[in-house]
Amino acid sequence: MAAALFSMTSKTILNQLKGGDRRSIGRANQLAKQAAMDPEIFRELIRALWNDDPLVRMRAADAAEKASAKNDRLLAPYRAELLGLLGETTQKEVRWHLAQMIPRLGLSKEERHRAADSLRLYLNDRSSIVRTFAMQALSDLAREDESLREEVVDLIRHLTRTGSPAMRARGRKLLAQFDRA
């Protein structure tokens, strides 16, 4: 009964994601903390990834990514939806958060290859942040799947020479991790 007093409605969660502009994360951090402990709140964040308002989508992606970093089991029920969104969304903020979440899903080989296909396309995104997180995600997937490793390492070597400063820095770290493995 006490839990019901504190549960948030879908409308309440959406209201916390609205308002302001793209320079503000709004109440995403508070929602992330709550969602990490409450699968119902996490479910509402996932639903909000398809909201008509780009600010809501951006903040929902931010909060869902942060919550899943603390509790990756929350992602499992949404595997198919998130893989579909990975291939569909063009919004940079949603893309970079999806790139962080997808490797946490514990994907099958087929799903990893599907995710890698989408992430390769992210490497052509206008946003350096999207490209950098795509590199990281591809590396994470390649660590789990030997069949991706050679191609991903070659790709990261290339991007370490030609990418943005953030991509070059991330690429050096990723290559060092592969060298140690």
Image: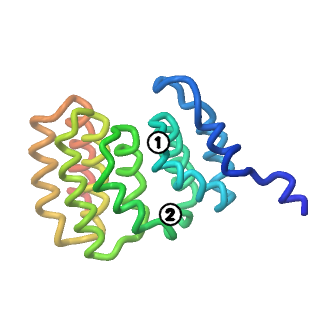
Disc 2: CA contacts within 10 A as few (<14), some (14-19) or many (>=20): many
* Sequence order check, earlier mark of 2 and 1: 1
- Please determine whether, in this image, residue 80 is positioned above or below residue 119: below
Disc 1: CA contacts within 10 A as few (<14), some (14-19) or many (>=20): few
- As drawn, the label of residue 154 is none
Horizontal and vertical percent for residue 145?
25, 71
Whole-number angstrom distance, CA of label 2 to CA of label 1: 22 Å
Disc 1 residue type (three-letter): Asp
Horizontal and vertical percent for residue 30?
66, 40
Q: Secondary structure at mark 1?
A: loop
55 or 163, nearer to the observer? 55
Q: CB under 8 Å between callouts 2 and 1? A: no
Q: What residue do we see at 48% from left, 37% from top?
A: 53
> Quick one: which residue is furthest to the front in this view?
52
Horizontal and vertical percent for residue 67?
57, 51
In the rendered structure, the answer to whether residue 165 lies left or right of residue 103 reads left
In the rendered structure, the answer to whether residue 113 lies left or right of residue 12 reads left
Quadrant where the N terminus sits is: bottom right
Q: What residue do we see at 30% from left, 40% from top?
A: 130
Q: How is the image coloured?
A: rainbow
- Quarter of the image for residue 74 reads bottom right
Horizontal and vertical percent for residue 112?
28, 68
- Quarter of the image for residue 29 reads top right
Residue with the mark numbered 2: 75
Disc 2 residue type (three-letter): Leu
Residue with the mark numbered 1: 52
72 or 1, nearer to the observer? 1
Q: Secondary structure at mark 2?
A: helix
Q: What residue do we see at 21% from left, 50% from top?
A: 175
- Quarter of the image for residue 162 reads top left
- Please determine whether, in this image, residue 56 is positioned above or below residue 35: above
> Quick one: which residue is furthest to the right in this view?
1
